[in-house]
Amino acid sequence: MRSGSSDRTRITVLAVLLLVGPLLATVSAAVDSPLAAASQPALDPPEVAPAPEEPVVTRVPGGRIDLHVRRLDVASALIQLRRLERRNIVISPSVTGTISLDLYGVTFEEALDAVLRSANLVAHQDGAFTYVCSQAEATERFTPRRAVASRVFKLSYANADEVMKLLQPLLSKDGKLSATIATQKGVHADKEAAGGNDYAASDIVVVVDYPENIERMQAVVAGVDVRPRQVLIEATILAATLMDDNSLGVDFTALCGVDFKAIGATSTAGQSVTLGDVPAGQLDRSTTSAVTQFTNGLPQGGLRVGYLKNGIGVFVQALEQVTDTVVLANPKVMVLNKQRGEVMVGRRDGYRTTITTETTTIENVQFLETGTKLVFRPFIGNDGYVRLEVHPEDSTGGLTEAGLPFEETAEVTTNIVVKDGATIVIGGLFRDSTRVRRGQVPLLGEIPGLGAAFRRTRDEALKQEVIILLTPHVVDDPAQDKHSQELLQDAERLRVGLRQGLQWHGRERLAQSYYRAATNHLRAGHRTLALWEVDAAIGLQPTFLDAIRLRERILEKEMTEPAGSAIKDLVLKRIRGPQPPASASQEDRS
């Protein structure tokens, strides 16, 4: 009974399908027809990214793992691994990216390493926990902090700012540099701005870094902070001037109709004549006058010949001047390598300058420096040569009557290379000029022989020559000390020589003689006579220090008096420091 009912039901469903099928095909065709397409807007299907596949992590015989993932987030793959193996894997928020892998028959450690390498991740094992994170986070969190050290570099010669620039490339990212502030004021600073709180000791650089970096910096500082070399520059400036001046002039005065005496003329030693006023009575007569003044334009001096008689006066002047001037300047100055050196021996002439505007007038005083000047900068090489930027100058000048400055100078500026100890000529100027001047009475001065009485001649020849020599000396310590001692001894010899040139009866010369006598008596063992002589020397010259020291040596005690000042006593106590016990001898105290 049930079987027949089921058969009837299946037959009914098939019939319905046969009837509905054509109807559905008709509707589908109508929908796909152009008319239907025109009646509905056309829509492009959206692009859908392929969905990532679920990871397939399975265990295979032997306790190994198969892993198959496609475009899967790396964190999801790690989650599947830790669940399969039941491991404590902690995933950091910095873990990002997708992976695609097919692994067959690998261990858990190999699968984890493959996943981490694919996503550029690292794992850090800490006991039972495995931390997975990015490389940067692992370096920040799990790299052990190294201990840093500090070092203080006390610089003797190098500048702290320059040393810091050299050490900066050797500094690690955890290192730090600091230094003292450089002193800004120098010897040319404004005296009103002198002082302040500038660091007074040597420059210091403090380094905080790893020990191996500090060792490398130590080597750099040791190579930089070295005593600079020095150069002694000796300049010789020779300026020679030769001037030859020849002059000849003839003056004559001729009066017709009146004599010199009648008009009250005067003459100075017969070398010239000064005419007076012509009397009024003489004006009725014929008077003729002829005068030349050719000697007025000639230099004073030389030979002057005069003749005066009645109304005739003739005067002849002849002069030859030869001026030979030689100026020799020999400045010397010592300076550090690569530093500017300057020496000036001369004078400064002040003059006023005025600046006037519509509202104000400002007057300033400026100075003209003249004399011998040497400005230079040496650069010492390693091959025995010295490069010099040099400017020697020798000048003279002053102010005119109007207060304006004028200057005559011989100078040169150059950049040269000189061997240590060699002398080089860096400037040589030769100038030769000739000037011929003539003054005469027209026509009469052209008459042969007789024309000399009607003209004036002056010939000048000027020769100038300037030579500048330079000699650099690279100074080492032994040579420097020896040279300094020699100069000191020369200065003392000069002082003694000047003193010996004084009058014998002067107080200083007498004190010197008493002092020499005291030293001779003391050398011979006559202490009483030596004390008398030295007291006489001190009596004549109370500030004679050598004599005072000799007296202290004879008496074996210091010459002191109460200061009478609390401040002075305090200063002396501070200078002398702690005093020895009273039982100590004077010799021990000294």
Image: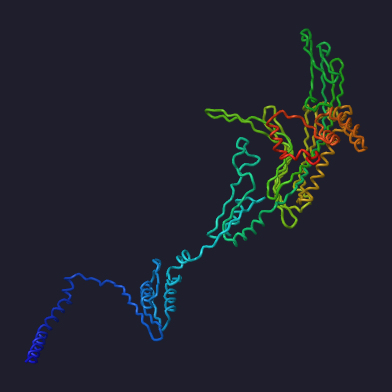
369 vs 277, nearest the viewer: 369
**Residue 310 makes an appearance in the image:** yes
Residue pictured at 93% horizontal, 37% vertical: 524
With 461 as the anchor, is 412 left or right in this view?
A: left
Residue pictured at 45% horizontal, 70% vertical: 126
Where 102 falls versus 214 (above or below)? below
Where 2 falls versus 209 (above or below)? below
379 vs 108, nearest the viewer: 108
Residue 124, position as x, y percentages in the image: 46, 70
With 274 as the anchor, is 351 left or right in this view?
A: left
Where 333 falls versus 112 (above or below)? above
Residue 224, position as x, y percentages in the image: 66, 55
Q: How many marks?
A: 0
447 vs 379, nearest the viewer: 379
Q: Which quarter of the figure is the N terminus placed in?
A: bottom left
Residue 370, position as x, y percentages in the image: 72, 36
Residue pictured at 20% horizontal, 69% vertical: 41
**Residue 590 makes an appearance in the image:** no
Quadrant of residue 85 within the rendered picture: bottom left
Q: Residue at the front extreme?
A: 583
Residue 319, position as x, y percentages in the image: 84, 29
Q: Residue at the left extreme?
A: 1
Q: Residue at the right extreme?
A: 524
Q: Which quarter of the figure is the C terminus placed in?
A: top right
* Display colour scheme: rainbow
